[in-house]
Image: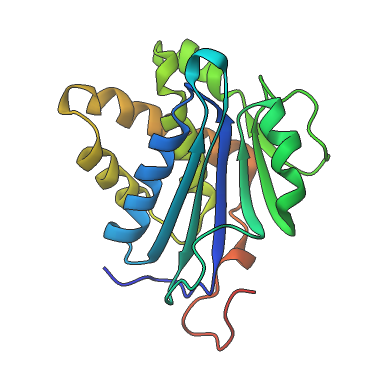
């Protein structure tokens, strides 16, 4: 599938603590963007041991062009699922970038300009499986990114998760997407520069 938006370079950092499924979240999102939407994607990751609550992050660089440098430098979307990660990585967010947090875990965001949902609580209360939190986050991220479709990420979920847990995770994904749609408002159009325009995203 050809990309439906031209992207010069778009950077995403997914961050939290060990055990939150950050790396899996990054892999599934990267799969959907690359194999389903047709973008070039570079993914890097760093994670600490779950038992010690070590810091964890997954970074994606997304582009319609070749990617000359695979690591994030100026983040367009920062997802912070712990207070520590939010403090640590907020300084790398672009001036027009967006911060998305788990409002149950990030109680003191470093800015008043952010979006968020209680993802961990939603997983426990609505899905009854705390480990599904990362897929709820994936749904919210998919809503925020105007250059990836629900269908692409749903296909990525089916391709990367065991068949026995697909139904539960599809429910979690839909929950995150719909709650983000109801809570966050319109997806930021400035992120996406469609092919009909002459300039690329800067």
**Could you tell me residue 43's position as x and y percent?**
43, 53
**Could you tell me residue 112's position as x and y percent?**
83, 39
Q: Residue at x 69, y 55 (%)?
A: 97
Q: Which is more toward the observer, 71 or 134?
A: 71
Residue 158 in sight in this render? yes
Q: Which is more toward the observer, 134 or 147?
A: 134
- Judge from the rendering whether residue 164 lies leftward or rightward of residue 68; answer left or right: left
Q: Is residue 113 above or below residue 136?
A: below
Q: Residue at x 32, y 66 (%)?
A: 38
Residue lying at the far bottom of the rendered structure = 198
- Judge from the rendering whether residue 48 lies leftward or rightward of residue 94; answer left or right: left
Q: Residue at x 34, y 27 (%)?
A: 171
Residue 177 in sight in this render? no
State the quadrant of the N terminus.
bottom left
**Could you tell me residue 35's position as x and y percent?**
27, 59
Q: Residue at x 57, y 24 (%)?
A: 54
Q: Is residue 90 above or below residue 86?
A: below
């Amino acid at each position: 599938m050809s990309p439906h938006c031209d992207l010069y370079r778009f950077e995403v950092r997914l961050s939290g603590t060990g055990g939150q499924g950050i790396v899996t979240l990054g892999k599934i999102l990267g799969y959907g963007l690359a194999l389903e939407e047709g973008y070039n994607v570079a993914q890097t990751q760093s994670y600490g041991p779950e038992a010690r609550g070590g810091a964890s992050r997954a970074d994606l660089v997304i582009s319609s062009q070749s990617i000359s440098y695979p690591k994030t430098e100026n983040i367009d979307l920062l997802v912070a699922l712990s207070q520590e990660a939010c403090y640590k990585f907020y300084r790398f967010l672009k001036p027009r970038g967006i911060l998305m947090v788990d409002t149950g875990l990030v109680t003191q965001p470093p800015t008043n300009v952010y979006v968020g949902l209680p993802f961990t609580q939603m997983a426990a209360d609505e899905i009854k499986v705390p480990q599904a939190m990362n897929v709820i986050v994936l749904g919210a991220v998919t809503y925020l990114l105007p250059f990836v479709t629900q269908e692409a990420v749903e296909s990525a979920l089916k391709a990367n998760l065991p068949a026995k847990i697909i139904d539960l995770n599809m429910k979690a994904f839909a929950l995150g997407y719909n709650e983000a749609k109801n809570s966050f408002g319109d997806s930021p159009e400035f992120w996406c520069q469609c092919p009909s325009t002459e300039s690329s995203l800067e």
